[in-house]
Amino acid sequence: MRLRSRFLRTCIRPRLQSLEARDVPSAANYYPPSFFTYDHTPTTQNSLAALPLNVADEIAFAYLSQHAADFQAAPADFVGAKITSQYSDADTGLTHIYLRQMVNGLEVQNADMNVSVAADGQVFSAAGGFVSGLAARLSPATVTPSRLAGNAVLMASLNLGLPIDPRTFSITEGNDLTHQSMAHAPGLSLADIPVHLQYVPTADGSAVLAWNMVIQTTDSQHWYDLSVGDASGAIVWQADWVSGGTYNAIPISTGSPVDGGFALQTNPADATASPFDWHDTDGKAGAEFTDTRGNNVVAHLDTNANNTPDPDDNGAIFRPDGGASLNFSGFTFDSASAPSTAQNQNIAQVNLFYLNNIAHDIHYKYGFT
């Protein structure tokens, strides 16, 4: 917590930058451009009482309207944005507000912003991106679907190659603007399938009307968050939340290599605590890293205890890499070799990454969020 406060006190240089291109789980997926800026140092280090949420919300919206051009947007793009989540951090006094772009009363998938407001009422940072001018491109008539929610689920099953048994399929169709529905398809999904209308951005700066749904396949191998285009019936966006890797690590129930040794752990991430797996950093489905880095944990060697990663002979930081499949099973422990050997250093990093992520997911269940 002290490190976080120190960060607040030392970030004194305004900066706006475009974020790295976000890795996506499918070549067809598209995300709006994303930006990050911080430009404030709290005026008093001891004034950490966070603002009331409604006050922080007003400040956040005003800031985005005034600085819309910095995010390649217009003030009108932020009008009517939906607050999807917000909370205050008692340790820093920051209030974090998460926003989703809305057009014609529908959410725009992946068009997200987050704003952090300091206790003195100044915006500390803002990040994300909306689709500029989208409301002008989409007439209100585009919210009228051409197919029913049940048909969208059928098209999803056909696209996935997972047929629905019509004898067990049922759906409760919603009649609100988003057509919020719930489908029961036990041959397709372990849980009932929530379905609703939204817009999915396209690379040309527009968006298509689509049916979003979450499908947990019956073999437990996939947990799809996908959108079926209303006009095309094709999957226009797809992510698989079950994208976790395989780790050769000491199980959480084992005290040490002597007590039981290493064992392969496949897809160990908790779906609630780490919904996008352990190698994600931007909150979107799809791994940004294939080595021992992610949102929860960054694991590396620090053999001289100077709180910085050890460089290799070429000055680069080496971490074990599991490749696109996140397969860390090839890293093994050699009990006959010294801890300083490369083989044992690598497995130590994999084990460190695994155990700390397990600790994160367990503590999440007890309110450490």
Image: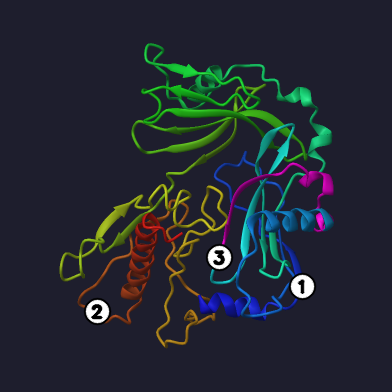
Q: Which secondary structure, mark 3?
A: loop
Q: Position of residue 119 (x, y in %)?
A: 66, 69
Say which residue label 1 marks: 14
Q: Amino acid at mark 2?
A: Ser
Residue occupying the point 75% across, 44% down: 131
Say which residue label 2 marks: 337
Q: Is residue 2 left or right of residue 356?
A: right
Q: What is the CA distance from the residue labelled 2 to the residue labelled 1?
A: 50 Å
Mark 1 neighbour class, 10 Å CA radius: few under 14, some 14 to 19, many 20 or more: few
Q: Are marks 1 and 3 in contact (CB under 8 Å)?
A: no
Q: Position of residue 313 (x, y in %)?
A: 49, 82
Say which residue label 3 marks: 89
Residue occupying the point 48% across, 50% down: 276
Q: Is residue 243 magenta?
A: no
Q: Is residue 151 left or right of residue 356?
A: right
Mark 3 neighbour class, 10 Å CA radius: few under 14, some 14 to 19, many 20 or more: few
Q: Earlier in the sequence, mark 1 or mark 3?
A: 1
Where residue 316 is drawn, which disc sits there?
A: none
Residue stretch rendered in magenta on the structure: 67-89
Q: What is the CA distance from the residue labelled 3 to the residue labelled 2?
A: 46 Å
